[in-house]
Structures are given as C-alpha cells and as structure tokens.
Amino acid sequence: MLQTVGAPAIAILVFAIILIWMTVKTVPQGEQWTIERFGRYTRTLQPGLGFLFPVMDKVGAKINMMETVLDIHSQEVITKDNAMVVADAIAFYQVIDAAQAAYEVRDLERAIRTLSMTNIRSVIGSMDLDASLSNRDMINTRLLTVIDEASHTWGVKVTRVEIKDLAPPADINEAMARQMKAERTKRADILQAEGHKQAAILKAEGEREAQIREAEGAREAAFLDAEARERLAEAEANATAMVSKAIAEGDIQAINYFVATKYTDALRDIAASPNSKTIMIPLEASGIIGSIAGVADIAKAVTAKKG
C-alpha cells in the first residue's frame, strides 16, 4: 500500500520540479535571452529572474550584450597604384537589440567579419600606397562609418575599427627605405647649404659693417683735419692782417717778420721731404738774424702799445 502511494507522489514531485525548471529562468548579467512561443519571437528576458509558460514558451537565443572584440583576418589588398599590401584589422562591437541580432542575421560574428574585410579592400583600394600608409586614422574613420551603418539593421553598434598593420611586400619596403635615406640625405645637404649661406651672409654683413665704420672714421678724421686747417688758415689770416696793418702804419719790421716766417716755413718743408738726403743751400745769416730781430722788435712794440 505504501509503495503504491509513494510512486505517484514521486512522479508528481518530479513533474513539479521539471515544471518549475521550465517556468523559472535566471538570466545572467550582461546577457539577454529571446523568448519564442510556438517558434515565434514574443519578448526578451532581461538579466535577473524570468518566467515562462511551460510547453508554450522556450528560450530562443542567448545574446551577449557586452562589447566584443572581433579579430579580422589578414588579407592582401591592392592599392590604387597597384601595390600589394597585407592588411590586418580588429573591430569592437556591441549588441544593442537582442531580437535583431538573433533574427535579422545568421552568424553575427561571421557577418561582421566578412563585412569588415570587404570594406577594408574597398577603402584601401581607393587610396595610393603612400596615402594608405600615412593616413590610418582616416582609414579607421571611414571603415567605422561604413561598417556601423551597414550593421545597424542587425541590432549592432560598431564602436571602433582599427587597422593593426599594413605590410607592403619586401621589395617595396626596400624601395621605401632607399627613398627615405635619399630624402634624409637631401635634407642634410639642404641644411648644410643653408648653414654655409647664412655664414656667408653674416660674413658679408660683418665686412660691410667694418667698411661703414672705417668710412665713418675716415670722414670724422677728415672733418677734424679740415677744421684744423680752417683754424690754421684763420690764424694765418689774422697774422697777415696784423702785419698788413703794421705795414700800413709804416712799421718796416713787420715786413721783415712776414718774410722771415715764410722763409723758415720753406726751409722746414724742404727738410721734411722724404726724398731729400743732404741739401746744401747758401743762406744769408745776417738776413735771417735781421728778420728775427725784426720779430723781436715787433713783439716789443706790441707790448709797449698794450702797456
């Protein structure tokens, strides 16, 4: 009797456990589950505890809602100038609509990877080799815009697309290395030439400044010499005026003074000449002495007048 009663109870207990398992679902954080009723999508379970109608409802797809890193396989790409490069990239995407990611595309990751590879060929193929190697940021931006727009209907947000590597063939690498070396040599030659040019300009400016200073010094010396000659001429003019006045007043000694002055000046010039060695000139000593005496008399007369 106990065995007969125990079997149905165990069966009911097992059925209740199975029913609870089919009814209550726990969705982990970072995921969303789609619910299908008789094969048709009805709703999406959020993280936490969820309930289903047994037999009628079932879990359709378990979608990871966290940002996912997708490695894009490397591929050979032909650039606009017919150069072959190997492109390797990586993409970051996040599902924002679980229902669209589950029912709008089959194999979401494969679809995004194929779409990315196709657009990489398209974007790099429209650029020259030099432009593709030096404008990775622009390539990344264009790829992100195109791939995100194309995958929007799948309930996916592509957050980043990065070109990890662009590798030209070995012969192109060697040619680029030679070109870079030639460019650096050219820049070094230009800088050296600019240095020589600047040095020559500074030297010329220095010589010009020295010539200007020398000319200014010569001009100043000439000005001072002219001023000295002017003062000398003025002194001679004053002396001549005094002698003329003395002659007009009948002082014969003034004539002797004037003649003696000119006479001694002539002898001084002859003695100072660089071409003269020894000069013998007959002189009248009495005439010179008389002239000197005349000078003394004139000095005495001037002193007497002042007294």
Image (cartoon, grey):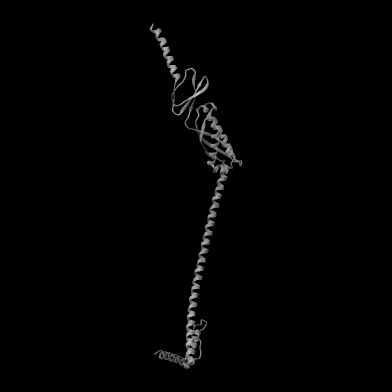
Instruction: Residue 115: give x, y in percent of width and height.
Output: 56, 33
Instruction: Residue 251: give x, y in percent of width and height.
Output: 47, 93
The total of numbered circles placed on residues is: 0
259 to 66, vertically: above or below: below
Give whichever of 97, 270 is nearer the camera.
97
Q: Residue shown at 44%/17% (left/top)?
A: 19
- Identity of the residue furthest to the left in this view: 2
Q: Residue shown at 52%/41% (left/top)?
A: 137
138 to 191, vertically: above or below: above
- Identity of the residue furthest to the top in this view: 1
Q: Residue shown at 53%/61% (left/top)?
A: 201
Quadrant containing the C terminus is bottom left
Residue 241 in view (yes/no): yes
Instruction: Residue 77: give x, y in percent of width and height.
Output: 58, 38
Q: With 285 as the anchor, is 128 left or right in this view?
A: right
10 to 198, vertically: above or below: above
Residue 264 in view (yes/no): no
Quadrant containing the N terminus is top left
Instruction: Residue 50: give x, y in percent of width and height.
Output: 44, 23
50 to 184, vertically: above or below: above
Give whichever of 290, 195 is nearer the camera.
290
